[in-house]
Image (spheres, rainbow, N blue to C red):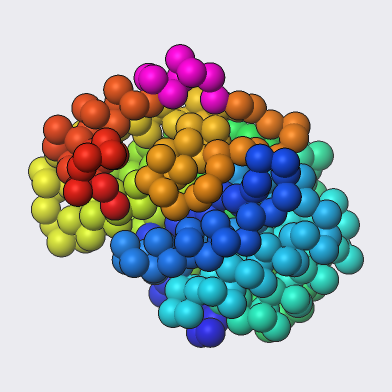
Amino acid sequence: MTKLTAQAAGTFAIAPTPFHDDGRIDEKSIDRLTDFYAEVGCDGVTVLGILGEAPKLDAAEAEQVAVRFVKRAKDLQIIVGVSAPGFASMRSLAKASMDAGAAGVMIAPPPHLRTDDQITGYFKQAQEAIGDEIPWVLQDYPLTLNVIFTPAVIRKIVMDSPSCVMLKHEDWPGLEKITMLRNFQKDGSLKPMSILVGNGGLFLDFEMERGADGAMTGYAFPELLIDVVKLSKAGKRDAAHDLFDAHLPLIRYEQQPGAGLSVRKYVLQKRGIIASSAQRKPGATITATARAEVDYLLSRVARVDRRANLQPQSSAAG
């Protein structure tokens, strides 16, 4: 598999980790999920992210999941989240993933980092731990991780690490941060790097206009992410916003802290892609009332985008 570069662009889906109802890893659903991402046109897939329930897996299971996705992926670039409390675990998973054919790895900051020096020092050590030859993605997700990266800190991390080729941007508000980073590149103080955006796609419409290269998030309709990215890059602003706006109520509903993953897995199960919406414990479950609300939102999205028509009699699903 081709290694990740600073020219990476398009849509990288964040994959949930499928489980059976009893908590066992569901490898057949991993295969269906990987095939689905390829069929709809994703450029890559990121596995073992925060919403991939990575902290609920032991080291052997994490490697099992990563390798399963990589081996199934064929032409998709796979990025593996390797964040861990210690560098030994990070190094081991990074090496196993790359040996299997992953394109790169993603590293998030541990929540105890506070000062700029602590942040930059940590990522310098992390890069040394995984080795210079492995391309890696810097994850900026302060709403969950409680670590604040200023644009200047991001610049220092990236400039100090030749193998850091991408930023996963998930700050909120974060539009001005994208603009500042692109301005750093214009004045020559920041090397080329890919910027893919997350936050469930909630701000994708304007993030693309600010200079993002694409999306890296797990919204249950990656086709929407792909279409908005392509329409934005083609300069079809109104078409991009019209389609995005149709999905926005469901994107918003999926964004609820602590509940979003159960919604996402429910929709993916409803689409026939994963067998169960189960999360490994501890995890939230989706109530009958919430399922009814999601079904209602799907019916409203389907008025504009037939791919959201998931009724059994429909031929438009998928």
Residue 13 versus residue 164 in the image, above or below: above
Going by the image, does 176 lie left or right of 73?
left
Q: 74 or 19: nearer the eye?
A: 19
Residue 262 lies in quadrant: top right
Residue 169 in the image: above or below residue 2: above
Number of numbered discs overlaid on the protein picture: 0
Q: Give the image location of residue 300, x and y in percent.
A: 22, 27
Q: Is residue 291 magenta?
A: yes
Residue 204 in view in this figure: yes
Please provide percent x and percent y for residue 183. 39, 57
Query: Toward the viewer: 318 or 164?
Result: 318
Is residue 260 found inside the magenta-colored segment of the image?
A: no
Residue 171 seen in the current view: no
Please name the residue shown 48% across and 80% down the image: 74
**Magenta stretch in the rendered image:** 286-293
Say left or right for 280 vs 263: right
